[in-house]
Amino acid sequence: MIDWSSQRASHNGRVALVTGAARGIGMGIAAWLISEGWQVVLTDVDRSRGFKVAKALGENAWFVTMDVADEKQVINGVAQVLGQFGRLDALVCNAAIADPHNTTLESLELAHWNRVLAVNLGGPMLLAKHCAPYLRAHCGAIVNLASTRAGQSEPDTEAYAASKGGLLALTHALAISLGPEIRVNAVSPGWIDVRDPSQRRAEPLTEADHAQHPAGRVGTVEDVAAMVAWLLSKNAGFVTGQEFVVDGGMTKKMIYT
């Protein structure tokens, strides 16, 4: 696990809720916000790791167990946040089923499709629904973590691609419904190396992995976290309903074989 303790900053009074924050991009976003002085509430279905990450992140981190597809758990989690901190300024919807073990369309079970859509798309809707009154009170912001897979695909990724495409549509719909008090944007990461440092050292990516990106390297969780933090800041006060692609330029690159 990454040691983020040296990045702590004094609390700036703002509270952010970050889902799927026990690892990867969600953990990186939580750590970045804490470094800027946010109080961050981390949520995840992985209770054990979630508490460990919150402890590692320090006193400005607090963990709540939550399955974002379960409305009762969402309601209870939001109530815990308000009970503990009395306010909510930002919501980052990162929790998702990445579906690394893809199956062919002919083998795709409806139950699996429904679960992916429930977590990846239903979760952000439920969180926006139940967080909106508290975000509105502080002119807050929402950032949804979509994916470049919303616009391009590899074989056998129907559920994931559909969920992320839907999330982009949900983002601009929410921006119109919740504005002007609440801004809503989406960040679509490309290839981001989300592995723990020990695994990255043991199995480093190849030069070819990095070189294929116009930016010259594979992305890091910090690349995504920096964009999310900016979108939550007052500097992005005129930005809403938009998608921001963080992919090292890959979606703009023509590739012929």
Image (cartoon, grey):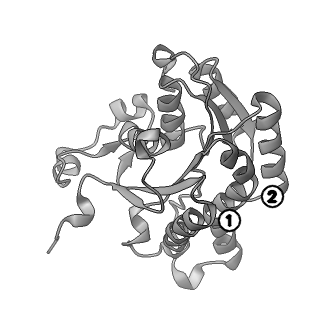
Residue at (31, 54) in percent of width and height: 247
At mark 1, the secondary structure is helix
Disc 1/disc 2 C-alpha distance (Å) = 9 Å
Could one spot residue 208 in this view of the protein? yes
* Type of amino acid at the residue the image marks with label 2: Glu
Q: In the image, is residue 79 above or below residue 110?
A: above
Residue sitting nearer the eye, 130 or 31: 130
Q: Residue furthest front?
A: 180
State left or right for residue 185 relative to residue 57.
left
Total number of numbered discs in the rendering: 2
Sequence-earlier tag: 1 or 2: 2
According to the picture, the residue beneath numbered tag 2 turns out to be 71
According to the picture, the residue beneath numbered tag 1 turns out to be 122
State left or right for residue 257 relative to residue 78.
left
On the image, the x and y values in percent for residue 110 come to 68, 79
On the image, the x and y values in percent for residue 116 come to 63, 66
